[in-house]
Image (cartoon, helix red, strand yellow):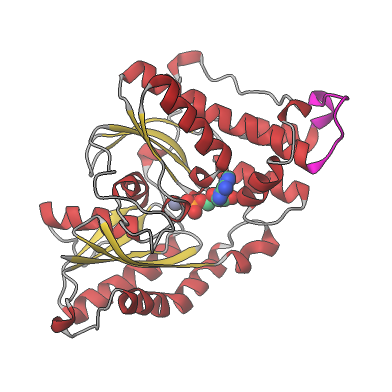
Amino acid sequence: MLTLGIESSCDETSAAVVEDGSRIRSLVVASQSGVHARYHGVVPEAASRAHAEQIYPVVKRALDEAGIVPHDPGSGGLTGIAVTNRPGLSGSLAVGLSFAKGYALAAGLPWIAVDHMAAHAYAAQLQDPEGSITGRAISPDSGLSYPYLVVLVSGGHTILAISRSREELQVLGTTIDDACGEAYDKVSAFLGTGYPGGPAIDRLARDGDPRACSLPRPRLNRNDNRYDFSYSGLKTAVVHQLERFWDKRFPRTRENIAAGFQKAAIDLVIDRVRNAIEDTGITRVAAGGGVAANSYLRSELENVSRELSVEVVLPPPILCMDNAAMVAGLGYHLLLTGNPSAWETGVSARIPAFRHRP
Ligand code: KG4
Ligand code: ZN
């Protein structure tokens, strides 16, 4: 059974065709980073406009690459459509949702609205046996069994959760202020290394020495919030208080600043993951969201895997970032076990469980 996935929650327009909820047949991602770069962040109005321009060509290409001819059942037609409708930028979500409804109506297909963060958590279950789509072969037996811990780190969210089933994400902790990727983007703007900031800082940090600046770790362990995150203090320390934390034996280079920032930002994530493994006894861990493409985060999670004998699944970077394969994969199962979405279904910018509890 082939599911078409559509994703347009932020600044990537993406479409994918996934077979039986796991094997990726095609995946197209059109990034808008060129549109938003000069503003150092996503401009919602510009994002909606770009989605409206890209949605048809992106879906068409995903269908072409999967060998599907719309309205030709002989080409091995689609059996359902899945689309992200929450959380995200309302105008951006509305473009994908409306397109999916229109397609479903015209083709007479069932469709389902999917939670973007649950889809990120599901990305660890996707397969690409030849590696021709994601750049890395992912065999059919590489998925994680439930429940597993999942850390979702992106430009809009920083969430540590237990993925109990495909549908149920039990949130353990969230950021109390900025998201991790947002901090990367702000520090990158400060260093003048462009947008999105994550990949630029990741590259710079490889040539830097994190000992040059020991940036402050947030104090979050009171009130049992062993799983929460905080990034605004770290960002302020880099942008306004670097002098206080600088070790004078090191030159003040962008590489050293990037390395010091990255160590503080990612060590916090790893610390939270360790806490959750220790407290829950769950020995399977997955990561998702754009920051999960980070090389230091990935190598630290590999270390956790070796040290604590836990199974860690890190999807290839294209599946960590916003993509429609994760939406199609999760949507397939939701369509199989539940009812299609109602035509009146709208978008939600936020999900209360993903926000910090006051
Ligand atoms: O999941 P995503 O593609 O979109 C959102 O839902 O936000 O994540 C985008 C975020 C951006 O903040 C970007 O700077 C960050 O992920 N990012 C990275 C890396 N690649 C992307 N952060 C750190 N290291 C990377 N290699
Ligand atoms: Zn995302």
Magenta residues: mostly which secondary structure? loop
- Residue at 16%, 58% in the rendered image: 335
Asked whether 114 or 130 is in front, the reply is 130
Q: Position of residue 336 (x, y in %)?
A: 12, 56
Q: Is residue 214 magenta?
A: no
- Residue at 29%, 43% in the rendered image: 142
285 to the left or right of 303: left
Q: Quadrant of residue 194?
A: bottom right
**One can see residue 276 in this view:** yes
Q: Where is residue 279 in the image (x, y as percent from the top left)?
A: 35, 16
69 to the left or right of 324: left
Q: Does the magenta stretch include residue 250?
A: yes
How many numbered markers are drawn?
0
339 to the left or right of 243: left
- Residue at 41%, 42% in the rendered image: 314
Q: Where is residue 286 in the image (x, y as percent from the top left)?
A: 37, 38
Magenta stretch? 241-254
333 to the left or right of 261: left
Task: Name above or below for residue 246 compared with residue 36.
Answer: above
Asked whether 299 or 8 is in front, the reply is 299
- Residue at 79%, 35% in the rendered image: 240
Q: Position of residue 22 (x, y in %)?
A: 25, 55
Asked whether 258 or 190 is in front, the reply is 258
Q: Quadrant of residue 46?
A: bottom right
**One can see residue 228 in this view:** no
